[in-house]
Amino acid sequence: MKLVKTTYNRRSFLRSSALAGGGMMLGFSWLASCKPTPEQLKSIPKEWFDINGFLKIADNGMVTIMSPNPEIGQNVKTAMPMIVAEELDVDWDDVIVEQAPLNTDIFTRQLAGGSQSIRQGWEGLRMAGATARQMLITAAAAAWQVPANEITTKAGVLSHEGSNKTAGYGEMASAAAGVEIPEEVPLKEATEFTIIGTDRKNVDGPKIVTGQPMFGLDIQEDGMLTAMIVHPPAFGMTYKSMDVESVKAMPGIKDVFPIEVYPEGVEKQWSDGGGIATLVAVVGESTWQCMQAKKALKVEWETTSKLESSADHEEALTRLLNSKPKEAARRDGDVPKAFKNAAKVIERTYSAPFLAHNTMEPMNFYAHVTAEEAKLKGPIQTPEFLEKTLASRLEMPLEKIDIMMTRMGGGFGRRLYGHFGVEAAVISKKMQAPIKLVYTREDDMTQGTYRPSYKVRYKAGLDENGKLIAWHVRGVGTNDDLVFENRFPAGAVDNYLAEKHMLESNVTTGAWRAPRSNFIAGAEQAFIDEVAELAGKDPIEFRLELFDRAINDPVGDPETNDYDPKRYAGVLRLVKEKAGWTGGKNGNSARGVASYYCHNSYVAQVLDLTMEGDTPTIDKVWCAVDCGIVINPLSARNQIEGGIIDGIGHATYSQMTFTDGKPDQENFDTYNLIRNNQAPKEIETFFVENGIDPTGLGEPSLPPVIGALANALYKATGQRYYHQPFISERQVVG
C-alpha cells in the first residue's frame, strides 16, 4: 500500500457540508478532474449541477465529479473519473460526470493537448478519491466507536466486521464533511484495482448515438443570429474594401461588415497564432442565408507580402536544408572524421506537405457579449487562453467572461487555436446580440493553421562490420523546427550530429496530431531500415543492437536522452513476438516494422500488406504499446487504432498545395482522406504491463506506422518511398 501526503495539494482540497440534502463535497485541482455523465441521474438534487470543480457525494450514495478538461474524443471524460472512483472505492454505476465550465480559480491547465490529461492528472485524481474514502472511514469510526483501521470499504459501502455494522457512503457523507483532511492517505496497489484496467464504455455514448445536443453546432439560444466569415483568398493578402449594399438587401441578412479581430494593443496568447487579423463578417438569420450572401459578396483584397506557391516552399526548404546552421542542436564525437573513415555511407532526404486538420465538426462558437459580461460556449481545447485574449480584446475583466466547453467533434490540434472564439465575441459585440459563428468546410480548409511542411536529410556511416559509427540529421520545418536532437539514436552511436532550421512563412501553421513526430518518426524509421539493409542485418535486430548500446554503454550522459532504451527495446521485442517476425515477408504479405517514442510513451508496429496491381491492401497491423498503466483498455485500443488509421491515411493520400498563396484544396473533392476500404483489415494491440504511472496515448501510435508502411511498401514493390503523400511518388529520390 502506498501512502501519499495530502499536504502536497492541500490547498486544492476544500470541504463543505452545504450541499442540498447533506453530503460531502471535495474540491480539488484540475488534476482530480472528470467523471462520466450517463442519463441515469436518478434522484440527484439539481443543485449539484450548479457546483463547479468538486467531487460530491450525495446522501443516497451517488457520486458526481465535474470534469474540467475538454473532451475532444480521447475519452478522458470516462477515464479520469475511473481513477477517482477506483480510489474512492465506489460502485461505477453510482458515478456521474458533468463537464465543468472554465474556472481558473479552482482548476489549472484546463487544456486538451499533448496527450497529457491522464499523465498529469494521475496523482491528483487518485488523491481526491482516496482522501474522500479516508474521511468517510474516519466518520464511520467515530459513529461506531471502533478503530478506523478496522473499517473496510467496497463498492460504496463501509463495513466493520467485529461489530457487524455497515453503512453506505451516503449515510456517512454529511458527517464526513466535518472531518479534518488527513495528513496522508493510502493509495491502492495496482493489483487491487477493480475499475482501472477494465473496459468501460464512453459515458457520452448514448447521447452521441441518439443525437442529443452536446456539440457546439447543436447550440440554439433565444434571439441567436448566425455569423459566417470571409477571409483573404490567399496567404499574403489582407482586406481592402467591399460593396455590401446589394448583399445587405438579401433575405435574412442583418449586416455585413469588416472586423478587426486583433487590433494593435491586444495581448495575444500563443493560442491566437492561427488567427487572421482582419476578416469580413456576414450575419443573418440562418446558415443558408449567410452562405448565399457570402457567394454574392464582392470583396477587394490587397497584397501585402509574397504570394508563395508550393514550388516556392519546396525551394526554400531545400535551400535551408543545404545550409549549415550556426550551431548544432547536439554533437557527440567527431562526425566528419567518422564519415571519412566509414566503410559505407548512405544519405537520404525525406519530405512531407502541409496538412489540414479537417475536424468532423466544423469550427464554430457561440458568443453573447454585452456591456456587463461575455458568455461563450463552444468546442475549444484551450479555454484558459481564449479567456485571457478575450479579456484584452473586449477590455473586460476575466471574472466577467464565462466560457462553457462543449464536447468536440474532433480537434487533432486544430482547436488549440481559439481565434474563432474571439471572432464570435467581436461579432456579437458589434451586433449587440447573441450569435453562433459557423465555418464552412472551405472556410476552415483554406484559413490555415496547417500541419507544417517538412524536409529532413539523414546520413549514416557503417564500419566494415556493419556497425553504425556515424549519424547526421538535419531538418527544417515551416514555422517550426523539426529535429528532436535527444531522441533515438542519440546516445547509441559514438559520432552523432543533429541540426535544425526553421523556415518562416505567411502560411499559418500549428500543432497537428503528434506535432513534428508525425513526420520525423516515419522518415527516421524508413531510413533506419535502409541502413540496416546496407549493414546486411535484420531491421529489428539492428535496432535492438543500438538499444543495447544505449543501455550498456551509452554515449554521453544518458540523462540527456529523452527516452528509456529498455522500454523502447521492450515494445520492439513484444511486437516481434506477437507478429511472429521472421523477416520482410509473411506468406504473401510484405512486412514493415517501426518503433518510436513520443508523448512519454513507446510504440512498436509491424505492418503486413499485399499489392493488388498498383494498390496496396493493408492486411494487418500489430502494435505494442508501453504507456504505463492503462486506465480503460477499450478506449485505449480505440485511440491506438484511430492513430494508426490516421497516420496511414495522411501519409498515403493527403496534402495541401498552393498557387500564388491560394490553397488548391478547399474541400474533400480535392483533399484526399483515407476511405474505409483503404484502412487496415485488422489491428491487434498489446499493452506492456509494468505498473508504471500512465503516460500519453492519444498520439503515440500515429508517428511510427508511417515508417512501418514505407518499409512494407519497399518489401512489396522494391521501391523506397521518401516523399509524402506516398501515392504521388513515382520514383526513388535520393
Image (tube, rainbow, N blue to C red):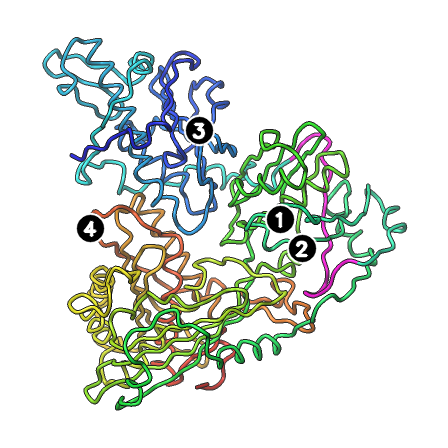
Q: Is residue 687 above or below residue 404?
A: below
Q: Is residue 175 above or below residue 504?
A: above
* Residue 690's disc number: 4
Q: Is residue 149 above or below residue 244?
A: above
Crowd class of label 4 (few under 14; some 14 to 19; many from 20; radius 10 Å): few
Q: Residues at badges 1 and 2 in contact (C-beta under 8 Å)?
A: yes
Q: Residues at badges 4 and 2 in contact (C-beta under 8 Å)?
A: no
In the image, is residue 442 part of the stretch drawn in magenta?
A: no
Measured Cα–Cα span from mark 2 to mark 3? 34 Å
Give the residue at mark 3: 53
Give the residue at mark 2: 276
- Give the residue type at disc 3: Gly
In the image, is residue 228 part of the stretch drawn in magenta?
A: yes
Q: Residue placed at 62% from the left, 29% from the top?
A: 400
Secondary structure beneath disc 1?
helix
Secondary structure beneath disc 3?
loop
Viewer-proximal residue among 694 and 207? 694
Q: Give the x, y percent position of residue 352.
A: 49, 72
Measured Cα–Cα span from mark 1 to mark 3? 26 Å
Q: Residue furthest left?
A: 162
